[in-house]
Image: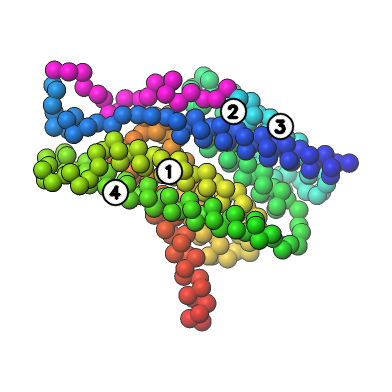
Amino acid sequence: MPEALSGISFVLALLFYGAASALFFLDVARSRTRLPSAADFAGLGAGSHHHDPTARPSAAAAPASRHAPLLLGLGALGHATYVTLASFVARVCPVHSVHFMLSVASLFAIAVYLVARRRFRVDALGLLIGPLGLAFLLGTFFLGKPHAETKLSPLFIAAHVMANLLGIALFLLAGASAALYLVQEKRLKQKRHVERMGGLPPLDTLDRAVHRFLSAGFPLLTLGIVTGTYWAHRLEMGNTEEVMRAIFGYATWLLIALVLLLRAAAGWRGRRAAYGTIAGLACAAAVLVIYLVRPAAGLGG
């Protein structure tokens, strides 16, 4: 009986977490801000109202979904139920298992977020909290009890690989747009080669391109991270390649999530968003290097 109830609570938590994460992401992805134009950098229109590039977007720019916090709370309730029941089924004390402890930590984080979100107006943090709860839930499911590694469906493996490849491809486009943004901004500030800047898009266009590519790639990377929890038990074997790949993979996801989050919550855009995007792309490139070096090292040996 406890095993059946734990399975039901796991499925419900999975669905609620997934729905909440999707709604939080849509709220952040819809946020729109304006960047300074070439006229702003050139100091034109001194008598008009000057736009403050650091101004924060209004609360209406990225309203938090009314249903997302509720779904997140329901997911946490199902998560807590699953952890409690799974502890009895697997006969594992949550205090003595790092995977169960991470689940409990994520539950505390969700509880604090739900209490503080209205007072401190941090609704956009749901973009981080929801997927983290989902990842720790899956980590507990796959790692909470010892079991032999079963043969995975080709569809599951294809979904994991394609999600990562498409996500990285979109991040490459975002990184290229971010680099062009920095070049264009530097030219505008230094007032150099103004007559030859027609080949580069305006700053607003480049910033929107960065945001759209990141918004499209982030769900794919999240899917890759979530499906990748199945292989997380390999980290316990102490393999350096697996550990480094996991570190850079989660760092990529965290940096991209922070860029999207800070854009919606704190008005981060332009240069700061470009630097964050390039840093995330560097971490993704490190993951690819590890994937490429491992077969080469095997052939060389």
The local crowd at label 1, few if under 14, some if 14 to 19, many if 20 or more residues have their Cα within 10 Å, is: many
**Mark carried by residue 179:** 4
Disc 3 designates what residue? 77
- State if disc 4 and disc 3 touch (CB < 8 Å): no
Secondary structure beneath label 1: helix
Residue 171, position in %: x, y? 41, 50
Of all residues, the one furthest to the bottom in this rendering is: 301
**Taking 11 as reference, is 42 above or below it?**
above
Q: Amino acid at mark 1?
A: Leu
Chief secondary structure of the magenta portion:
loop
Disc 1 designates what residue? 214
Residue interval drawn in magenta? 47-66
**Mark carried by residue 68:** 2
Q: CA distance from mark 2 to mark 3?
A: 14 Å
Foreground disc of the pair 2, 3: 2
Of all residues, the one furthest to the right in this rendering is: 1
The local crowd at label 3, few if under 14, some if 14 to 19, many if 20 or more residues have their Cα within 10 Å, is: some
- State if disc 4 and disc 2 touch (CB < 8 Å): no
- State if disc 3 and disc 2 touch (CB < 8 Å): no
- State if disc 3 and disc 1 touch (CB < 8 Å): no
**Mark carried by residue 249:** none
Residue found at x 60% / y 64%: 238
